[in-house]
Amino acid sequence: MLKSKTFVKKTRAGGVMKIVREHYLRDDIWCGSDICAECKHECAVLQRDPFIESNLCSYLHYVIPDTNVVLHQIDVLENPVICNVIILQTVLQEVRHRSAPVYKRLKDIIHEKEKHFYTFTNEHHKETFIEREPGESANDRNDRAIRVAAKWYSQHLEKSRAEADGPKVVLLTNDQGNKRKAEESGLLVYRCEEYIKSLIANPELVDCLALSNDDKNDITSSKMIFPEHLPLSRIQAGIKSGTFLQGTFRASRDNYLEASVFVQGEGEDSTEVLIQGLQNLNRAVYQDLVAVQLLPRNQWVAPSSIVLQDEGAAKDDNEEDKDEEAESLRMSAAESARKPTGKVVGIIKRNWRPYCGMLNPSQIKESTRHLFTPADRRIPRIRIETRQASTLAGHRIMVAMDGWPRHSRYPNGHFVRSLGNAGDKETEQEVLLLEHDVPHQAFTQAVLSFLPKMPWVITPEEMARREDLRHLTVCSVDPPGCTDIDDALHCRDLDNGNLEVGVHIADVSHFIRPGNAMDIEAANRGTTVYLCGKRIDMVPELLSSNLCSLRSNVERLAFSCIWEMNHKAEIIKTRFTKSVINSKASLTYAEAQMMIDTTKNDDVTKSLRGLNKLAKILKKQRIKKGALTLSSLEVRFHIDSETHDPIDLQTKELMETNSMVEEFMLLANISVAQKIFDEFPDCALLRKHPAPPPSNYDILLKASKSKGVEIHTDSAKALADSLDVARVDGFPYFNTLLRILATRCMMQAVYFCSGMDSDFLHYGLASPIYTHFTSPIRRYADIIVHRLLAVAVGADSTYPDLMDKQKQAALSNNLNYRHKMSQYAQRASVAFHTQLFFKSRGILNEDGFVLFVRKNAIIVLIPKFGLEGTVFFDAKDKAGPALVFDEEGPTLKVEQHTFRLFDKVKVTISLDASNIQHQKIRMSLIEPVIAGVSVPPPDVEPQAKKPKLDR
C-alpha cells in the first residue's frame, strides 16, 4: 500500500520544483510479542509473561513510553528492572531529532537482548499510520500517533488474552492533555512518576526519576535569586545585532563565583569574557553554550586571586554570597590588568552529562533532600532527592541534572547509580574513565563479529598481493611489557654502497574495513588509553595484542615505508608497499641498547647499530632546522605483584634507542604526509602544531631573565638555539627546568583535513607537513592515513567518506577531543597512583625547585618523582607570615626570604586525605627556614619496602 504526498518548492534560482514523497504501508509488520498467535515469528522480543511487581498494575503488561518520558527518564529505562518495553518508531524518530546522546543510549538499550525492548515501526503499519490533520501541530500529530499505536496493541493482544492470561499495554506519559485523551480512548495510561513509584519491589528506582516541573517547584523557595534567561528568539536577534556574544562557558576550578566565556572569532579576533558573581553567572554550567552581554567598561575587573570553594553545609536558597562576592570583586578591583567583563543573559545549549561525585547527606533527620558534590570542581553542587542517603554515604555515585530554576541556589538533579566505595581502586578508575568521557565498555557482539576466524593464516591470494619481506632482519624496540607492537625496523647494506632502511607498521586497515561495526567503534574511541596498570583498547585484543601486533617469529601483515639512504642519512629514494614480515626479535629499549653497546655482531645487532648511527644524524639535521627538544618528566611505578599497589615511583630514563625509534617514526610520518597530500590535496588527514602566541612565553622569559640568561622566541629555531646554550654555572638542572617550562608554553598539536586549512606547519618538529602513520593499533587517525596511502599506491580502493573533506574535518574534531581526554585521563591515573604511593610511604623529605610563584604560594617540582605540589603561605591569620608578591619578577617575599623561579628548596611530602573525594599531595617547606611557617610533624615514619617486579 502506497501513500504519496506532492508539493512544489521554490528553488534558489527562482524556479519551481515538484516534489513527490512516497510512504509505503504494510500489513505484515509483527508486534514482537511471544504470546501473539497472529504474528508468527521465530525471534520474539517481548516476553510471554512480562511480570513486574506493581501495586498499580497487578497484571502482566508491556510498557509504551512517549517521547518526553524517553528523553527525560532515560536513566530509569536503562535500569535492569525495566524490561518488555515497546519503542514506537514515532518516538524513536523524535528522540533522534531532539537529543543525539539520549538516542544513542536508547539504541544501546534496544540492542541488549536481556532488556526485551522492541521497536515497532508504527509509521509503516497500515493500521497505525495516521495523516496529519489540517491545523494540527506536528507534536499533537505525534501524540495521536502514539495513542493510535497503543490502542492497536491493546486490541491486537486481546485475542491472545482470550486464550490465556496474556499481557496488557500500559502507556506512560507526563503530558496531561495526552493522558486525558488516552483515557478517553479507553487506554491504560499513567504518569511515569506514579508508575515507577508503584514498583514496590524496587523502591530505589524512584531516586532515578528526573524531576518534573511540579517537583522542581516543590523543592525550591519562592524568592528569585537569578535573573530570568532571555528567550532564544531575543538571544539570536541580539547576537546578530552585536548586543550579545555567543561562547562556551568555562567555570573556574579555584573560584566557584568566577568563570570565563570563550567567544570564537575570525583568526585572532577570538576573545575571552570574564564573568564574576553568582547573578552574573546566572545558572550557566561548565561547557554550556551561552549568550553574554558585556558590562560597561568601568565595571570591568581582573580575574580574582583568591580561592573560593563551595563546600560545607548547604546554603539556603534565600541566602546570598554577598561577603564572598564582595571579597572576590574587591580583590579583582585592585588589579591593573582588567579584562572584558560580562554577564550571562541566556543559555543557547545545555551540555550537561551525568556527573560522578559524592553525597553530602542532609543534617536534618528523615530528610530525603541532599546535596551532591561533583568530583569536577567546575560543576556546581546538585540538589537531589534520595531515600538511600545512609547507604550511599562514602560511595562514589553518579547524578544527572534536570534543571536549574531561578529561585534555587543549586541545580536540581536525580540519582543515576552507585559506582562503589570512595578510595577503592576499581571505583576510582571507573570515575576517572567516566569523568574524562573515555569509552571503556566491553566490545559488543556486533563489533566482535567482524574479527577474523581463528586459527588465522595469511592466504596465498593475500600473499600474492603483497611484497614478501620475511627474509629481512626486522626487529621491534618497545617499552617493557608492550604487547601491542605497532612498528618494526630494519637496516641493511645495498650493493651500490647505500643503505636500505625500512619502517614496517602493523596493517590494521586490512582487518578493519570501512563502515563496519568495528570501524565505527574504533572511530568513536579514537585512541587507546594507557592508565597505570590498565589499557583501554581502541580495537579488540585479538587484533591489538595478537594478529596485528608485530611479534617476533610470526608472519604478520605490514605497511612498509622503505628508503634508500646514503651514509649521511640523505634520502635517495622512497617507496611504500603492503608487505609480509617476520620479525626476528621483539626487544625492549634497554635490551636493544645493550646489544648496540656490546661486541656482538649478529644480523639484528648490525641492523640496530646502522639504525642508531643514522638516527643520530637525522636528529642533528632536525635540530639544525629548528626542531625543539623539550622536556617533561614521565614517571614509572613499580607495582606489587600481589596487591597491585605502587611500591616505588621514579622518573623514566631515556636511552639512545628511544631516540633511535623516534627519529625513524618521525621520518616515516613526514614521508607519508607528503605522499598523501600530493595525491589527495583536499582530503589528506594531517597533523599540525600551531606556533604559540608571544604572550605564552612570558613566564619562560621571566625565568631565564632572573638567572641572567637570554632566550629568543622569534621562531622555533631561535628558541631551540637559545635553549641549547642556556647554562648557569653550578646549576646543572637549570637547562632541564627551562625546557620543562618551555613545554608548558606550547600549543596543543591537532589533526585537521588538508582541504579545510592552509596552515600545515608543525612548530615543534619544524616540519612543513606531518601526519600520524606509525601507530594504527592505538590511534584511529593512523588507520585513515593507511587507507589514504593504500589508495595512493594502488593497494586498496577508496570509498566516499574518505574523499569527503567535511566528514574528514568532523572526524578530526572527534579525534582531537578523544586524544585530549585520553591525556587528561592518563594524568589523573598517575595522580591517583601517586597518592596511593604516598599513602603507604607516609611523609618523605625531598629536594625540589620552584617552578611557579603565586600570590600566596610556590609550586614546587620534585625531580626524583616527577611530581608537582603547592606550598601555601596563609597570610589570613594574624599570626601568619607577611607576604609581598611582585608580578614582574615574579617573586614572593615571605617574611625576610624572597622566592624566585628555579630556587632550590626542601619540602616534606605527604598525602592530605581530609577530603576523601579530593585527596591531594601536600607539601610543606623545610628549607629555607622561615619564621611563622611551621612544618607539620611526621605522622608515621617512612618504611622502606623492597621493590618487586616492575610491571
Image (cartoon, grey):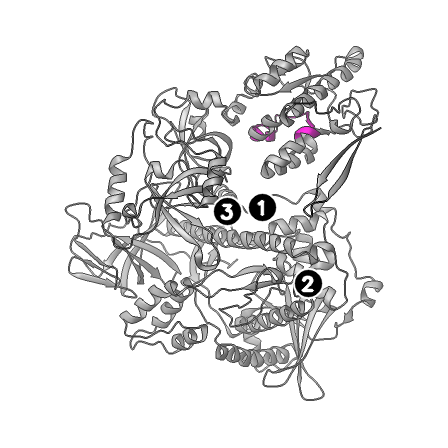
Q: CA distance from mark 3 to mark 2?
A: 28 Å
Q: Nearer the viewer, mark 3 or mark 2?
A: 2
Q: Which residue is mark 3?
A: 436
Q: Is residue 246 left or right of residue 223?
A: right
Is residue 794 visible in the rendered structure shown here?
Answer: yes
**Circle 3: element type:** loop
Callout 3 touching callout 2 (CB < 8 Å): no
User: Considering only vertical position in the picture, is 532 above or below 378?
Assistant: below
- Confirm whether the magenta stretch covers residue 132: no
- Confirm whether the magenta stretch covers residue 84: yes
Q: Which residues are magenta?
A: 73-91
Q: CA distance from mark 1 to mark 2?
A: 24 Å
- Amino acid tagged 2: His
Q: Which residue is mark 1?
A: 439
User: Considering only vertical position in the picture, is 582 above or below 170?
Assistant: below
Residue at point 57%, 59% (across, down): 751
**Circle 2: element type:** helix
Q: Looking at the image, is mark 1 or mark 2 earlier in the sequence?
A: 1
Residue 355 location, x and y as percent?
A: 48, 38
Q: Residues within 10 Å of mark 1 (few under 14, many from 20)?
A: some
Callout 1 touching callout 2 (CB < 8 Å): no
Callout 3 touching callout 1 (CB < 8 Å): no
- Amino acid tagged 1: Pro
Instruction: Tell me where residue 791 sits by quadrant.
Output: bottom right
- Amino acid tagged 3: His
User: Considering only vertical position in the picture, is 261 above or below 142?
Assistant: below
Instruction: Tell me where residue 577 sits by quadrant.
Output: bottom right
Residue at point 33%, 51% (across, down): 339
- 472 and 675: which one is in front? 675
Residue 70 location, x and y as percent?
A: 60, 28
Q: Is residue 707 left or right of residue 289?
A: left
